[in-house]
Image (spheres, rainbow, N blue to C red):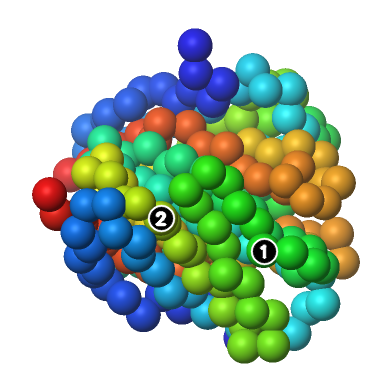
């Protein structure tokens, strides 16, 4: 079974709709992240969380919100989706900072979102 | 500005040969981590290798090695004995921690094609 799972894997929605992307992990990691990937732009950080009570904005948080329901779950919401939010969204996890390879982020399989 | 630069949009290599994917970074922080990820056409992000800014030796993981030249701010990925399955997008990334906040910056990627 995959350590980091994302649901749904694909989603088509209409402008103005509210949608939620979910991420679960079984790695026991404290840190979780949401990224979006656009062609030619690489990955950009939307939000991250160091633990259940800690939520931080990333590079491109406008138009998004998150919820850390438990150590293992981190959800990303688009309150009112717009077409330029069409992208591939990744969830990632990493262990509590300890340096070295513990900083490595492990990614989920991604969610392809199309906003019409 | 803190950023990652991958100057090769695409690279071609013959099967069984070695290939170097370039990555340069820009930061004034003394502590940072450098990562390489592989993204095959199926879309998932696969962690390959990690190098810490204070690591004395270049990181190696099987056929992957990281040529870390701190003074030149470069962290090139070397893949030895290329295989057809190595054809994918490759992303270089840098992790920074500043005053408790976290920032992860990705390059725009290099598309590697391994020819038989």
Disc 2 target residue: B80
Residue ID at (35%, 65%) = B19
Residue ID at (22%, 52%) = B15
Observer-side mark, 2 or 1, equals 2
Q: Quadrant of residue A52?
A: top right
For residue B36, side relative to residue B42 (left or right): right
Classify 10 Å Cα crowding around label 1: few (below 14), some (14-19), many (20 and above): some
The chain that hosts pointer 2 is: B
For residue A23, side relative to residue A41 (left or right): right
Residue ID at (60%, 53%) = B60
Indicate whether A95 appears above or below A36.
above
Indicate whether A23 appears above or below B18.
above
- Residue B114, horizontal then vertical, whole percent: 20, 54
Indicate whether B103 appears above or below A83.
below
The answer to whether tags 2 and 1 share a subunit is yes
Query: In which quadrant is the N terminus of chain B drawn?
Result: bottom right
For residue B78, side relative to residue A45 (left or right): left
Element marked by disc 1: loop
Classify 10 Å Cα crowding around label 2: few (below 14), some (14-19), many (20 and above): some
The chain that hosts pointer 1 is: B
Q: Spatial distance from mark 2 to mark 1, Cα to Cα?
A: 15 Å
Residue ID at (69%, 39%) = A94
Element marked by disc 2: loop
Residue in the foreground of this view, choosing between B106 and A79: B106
- Looking at marks 2 and 1 on the same chain, the residue that comes earlier in the sequence is marked by 1
Disc 1 target residue: B58
Badge 2 vs badge 1, beta-carbon distance below 8 Å: no
């Amino acid at each position: 079974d995959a350590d980091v799972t994302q649901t749904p894997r694909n989603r088509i929605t209409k402008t103005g709709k509210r949608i939620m992307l979910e991420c679960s992990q079984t790695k026991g990691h404290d840190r979780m992240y949401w990224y979006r990937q656009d062609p030619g732009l690489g990955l950009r950080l939307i939000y991250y969380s160091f633990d259940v009570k800690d939520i931080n904005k990333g590079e491109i948080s406008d138009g998004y919100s998150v919820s850390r329901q438990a150590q293992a779950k981190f959800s990303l919401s688009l309150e009112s989706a717009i077409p330029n939010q069409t992208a591939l969204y990744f969830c990632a996890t990493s262990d509590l900072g300890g340096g070295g390879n513990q900083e490595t982020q492990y990614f989920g399989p991604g969610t392809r979102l199309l906003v019409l | 500005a803190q950023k990652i630069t991958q100057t090769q949009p695409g690279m071609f290599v013959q099967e069984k040969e070695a290939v170097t994917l370039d990555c340069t970074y820009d930061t004034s922080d003394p502590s940072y981590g450098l990562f390489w990820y592989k993204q095959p056409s199926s879309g998932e992000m696969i962690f390959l290798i990690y190098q810490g800014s204070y690591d004395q030796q270049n990181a190696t993981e099987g056929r992957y090695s990281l040529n870390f030249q701190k003074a030149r701010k470069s962290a090139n990925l070397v893949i030895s004995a290329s295989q057809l399955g190595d054809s994918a997008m490759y992303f270089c990334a840098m992790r920074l921690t500043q005053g408790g906040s976290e920032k992860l910056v990705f390059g725009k990627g290099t598309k590697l094609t391994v020819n038989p």
